[in-house]
Image (cartoon, helix red, strand yellow):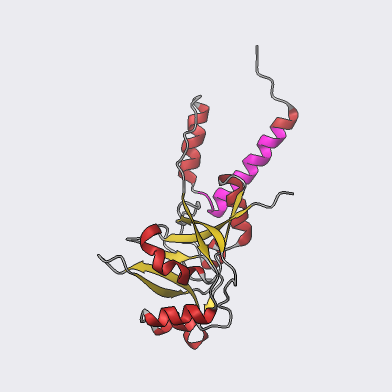
Amino acid sequence: MKNIVTDGQLVALTKRQNELYKRVTKGTIPIQPVLEGLQILIEGGALTNPGTYRTFSMKIGGATPEQLRWLMQRRGIDNWPFSAINSPDFITSATEWNIDLITLTPAELGFIDKPQTSDLFDPNFLSIWSNHNLDDQVLGLCPPEIGVQLVDRFADFLSGESVTVAMNPLLGVENIPVIFVLTDEGEDFKCQLNVTRSYPFYKFRLDQQILFQLMPAVKS
């Protein structure tokens, strides 16, 4: 018995095809995996699970900006990151709460060219990517305190790497917009809090580890 394809299914296929074409053209998903996946389906095969993303949870909040600045001063923080946490926009949660986090590279997010900050952190892009790749969750920017809160727990979650925090920029030295970067100083697994400039046109490496917040998707 022949499989019957309804008109509605054909319309849905056409819409998906057009969406796929637009995303490949824009460069938000890489062309080669798309071609390989389509070829597998054409030949009657089954797509394999690409793997799981690295996620973790931790508690943040419960400290004032002044307390976190004091902790960073005790660690001998440099002037650039200290100017960021001294910004009026560096706010914290008065109560503790659990945050879910995920590290992804621009390549894992589908970029084939180095993305600009404005593209990588675009809420609409993050929503679309999440809808296609995550179950009932959506990528979001991290609260500004996460960089400082992670310093003492870096070895537990992110040791041996450099991780850039996806966040709204803070004004640092000379009012230059910056975001936090966590780096491993070496064998003792001490973490150093740094910053990198975050103009909208700045670009990220395709293999750069970016830390995003995972939030529940809003159901319509």
Residue pushed farthest bottom?
174
Instruction: Report the front residue among 202 and 160.
Output: 160
Q: Position of residue 100 (x, y in %)?
A: 53, 56
Can residue 46 be seen in this snapshot?
yes
Instruction: Report the front residue among 31 and 90.
Output: 90
Q: Position of residue 161 (x, y in %)?
A: 35, 61
**Residue 8 placement: quadrant:** top right
In which quadrant of the rendered image does the N terminus lie?
A: top right
Residue pushed farthest top?
1
- Residue at image coords 52%, 71%: 145
Q: Main secondary structure of the magenta part?
A: helix
Instruction: Report the front residue among 209 and 78.
Output: 78
Q: Is residue 20 magenta?
A: yes
Q: Position of residue 50 (x, y in %)?
A: 46, 40
Q: Is residue 111 above or below residue 134?
A: below
**Residue 209 placement: quadrant:** bottom left
Q: Which residues are magenta?
A: 10-29
- Residue at image coords 46%, 48%: 53
Q: Is residue 55 magenta?
A: no
Q: Report whether 9 appears left or right of 141.
A: right
